[in-house]
Amino acid sequence: MIFDEFWTLEEARNYSTGEIFQKLSDLGITLKAEEFLQQIQSCYGTSDLKQQWKSLYEISAQGRDKDFVSLGALVLWERLAPDCFSSDQLYVAIEEGLDDLEAGENRKVCDLWLECWAKLKERFIPMGLSFAEVDKKFNGCLYAVSDWLLDIPTELDKLGKEEPIYFQKEIDYCRDFLATFPDADDRAVLQLTMLEAMTLFSLEKVEEGDHCFENLVKRYPGKDFLYTIWGGVHWKAAFCPPSRVDLDKAEQIYRMGLTNLGDDYKMLLPDLKAVDKERLKAKKKSRAETKQKGKGKKSTRK
């Protein structure tokens, strides 16, 4: 069969550590455990290590033995440096997490991915990793690692609706990500800051949520949806409980948008009209309640 022509990871794992080093030596890669451990310090994973070996050794591997170079490196990394986080370990965690999400194991996935985030920062940020280089450095995963990094807070948000402690973990992650990657692109900044803001409003931390939106509109004054969403969290039923409705604040935000958006202001007009309508409705309700109270007092006097 065609698959017999390739080495498998299981086959490589059946070799002892000494046998792997000997096999690599037979293929032109002669090194000891100490050298291996030193070499991996500058590598993100086995793909980098293999490139380093190509520059250091005359590799004679042919046919299926070409597979052994990568697989042997992977098994040695597993055995000799299990605590030295690698891109290979990250890829496995991402794929396992995606499978577990389909199985409904959200908490397991969130905990696993937060652990990977901590290890990624500890291992790769000191090596100079920037957000712009994430997908270039981690190019061996079927799922873009930059997308995975932005998926983490979304999954935390979903779980937070069942276990509120994960709302705070979501907020912490968003802040930590943006502090870790000051070069984050607009997509990341907008997505994570908005997630943080909306979660803060969910936790009734209104001033902190407003502060997030204030920072966003300063940085992106021409993004009309920011004013729509920010104003909405102060009065729309989907985001705001009746006890927190602040129509004046919502109107202030929409009018800020009218000033900042220039010719694109028209998107905010329906919201402004809706706020006016809601204000009139609130006044009518207040008058009706006052009138009803007055009737109650007259009835009591009789």
Image (cartoon, rainbow, N blue to C red):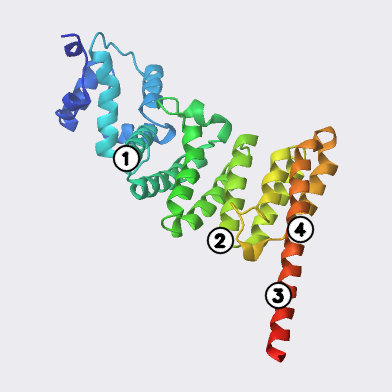
Q: Say which residue appears at 29% left-offset and 27% top-offset.
A: 73
| Foreground residue among 299 and 294 | 299
**What is the three-letter code of the residue carrying label 1?**
Asp
Residue identified by numbered label 1: 100
- From this viewpoint, is residue 185 visible? no
Q: Determine whether 149 is above or below 108 in the image.
A: above
Closest to the camera, between mark 1 and mark 2, is: 2
Q: Seen from this angle, which residue lies furthest bottom?
A: 301
Say which label, 3 or 2, has the lower sequence index.
Answer: 2
Q: Say which residue appears at 41% left-offset and 18% top-offset.
A: 55
**What is the three-letter code of the residue carrying label 4?**
Arg
Q: Seen from this angle, which residue lies furthest front?
A: 302
Q: Say which residue appears at 56% left-offset and 54% top-offset.
A: 199
SS at circle 1: helix
Q: Percent x, y for residue 15?
A: 15, 28
Residue identified by numbered label 3: 292
**What is the three-letter code of the residue carrying label 2?**
Leu
Residue identified by numbered label 2: 203
**What is the three-letter code of the residue carrying label 3?**
Gln
Between the C-alphas of marks 1 and 2, the distance is 28 Å
Is disc 3 in contact with disc 4, using a CB cutoff of under 8 Å? no
